[in-house]
Amino acid sequence: MNRYLIPLAVFALVVVVFAIGIAEAPRKDLVPSPLIGKEVPNFSLPSLTDPTQEVSSKQLLGHWYLFNVWGTWCVSCRMEHPELLQIARSGAVPIIGLDWKDSRAEALAFLKKEGDPYQRIAVDRKGNEAIRWGVYGAPETFVVNPEGIIVYKYIGPITPQAWVQNILPHLPAAQTASAGS
Amino acid sequence: MRARLSARVLLPVLLLLAPAALAIAPTRMPTPQLEARYERLIHGFRCMQCQDESLADSPVSLAADMRRQIRHMLIAGDSDQQIRHFFVSRYGYFILFKPPFVARTAWLWLAPGVLLIIGAISAIMVIRRRTVLVKSDEEEPVEDTVRGKRS
């Protein structure tokens, strides 16, 4: 009896280790952001629509917003665009864009053609700002509260399902109600 | 004579420089010290897009942006520690190829040692038992000793 006990215990241990490993790393491409629970990086960037104006982290304090990193070169961003327009129409939460490593002319043409869901768009021509946000692929969307704290980060295109299941629960109830109606 | 000498000197030099042409990021830092630190740093960070490549080896544009960030920070006088902290605080420990020893990663570093000790103890136990078996071999059948109390 005893001689089956040790291999059995070793096997059980291996099962536990693998179970933790599989549960902890459901998807290798989704790296959790250490910025969640922290203040947004301070930024002050030119606006896409009017380069003489700036979009800054200070202006955005005081209300909830989504910070959406996108670019016209990014196929997944085009995929989520209708959903962003839908969110903007619902008035659930303002969307601030970060136009990442993009051409201004192409970005403006794209928004003119497809519609503009953004309340404001900051421009990150060289990609320095995206690094400060820990961005590693577009689209990425941060949920920011009125104190300027990042409460959630969604990686990948926002689908209607992702909006309801992943993002909406992180917004306050009042916002949820207005979006649900 | 002179032509031969220059060929003798030039050829090894050119051969030594050849790999530089293949480098993804042939950059010039102001001093050799900074260049060495830059090289070490870009080999220690993971490219977040390709994940199994370092910043030094990755051709994607995000890696180029990160290398530029490291370059700027080095020239601005930041320490290696500060640069590592900059990236870890934004991307997490995942960006480091060599994870640091902290509470969350302790098991990662300690597990091999613990497993080694478990292995050593089991090995000693097995060897001892075998030694006992061999000694008692002459007195009674092996099977009885192994199975224990049969009689």
Image: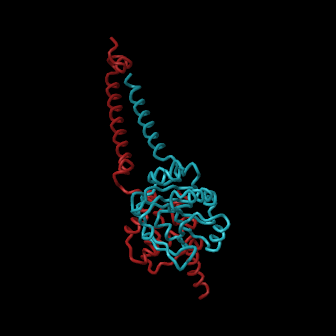
Chain colours: A cyan, B red
Between residues A119 and A99, which one lies in front from this camera angle?
A119
Would you place residue B10 above or below residue A42 in this image? below
Q: Residue furthest bottom?
A: B2
Relative placement, left or right, of A87 versus B89 is right
**Residue at left offset 41%, top offset 56%:** B99
- x and y, in percent, of residue A52 in the image: 53, 80
> How far from the left and from the top, in percent, is residue A17?
43, 40
The x, y position of residue B38, in whole percent, is: 46, 71
Residue in view at x 55 percent, y 78 percent: A51
Res A111 quadrant in image: bottom right
In-front residue for pair A173/B56: A173
Closer to us: A164 or B141: A164
- Which of the two residues, A117 or B19, is positioned nearer the viewer here? A117
User: Up-down: is B140 above or below B114?
Assistant: above
**In this picture, is A79 found above or below B76?**
above
**B27 on left or right of A79:** left
Relative image position of residue A155 (x, y in whole percent): 53, 56
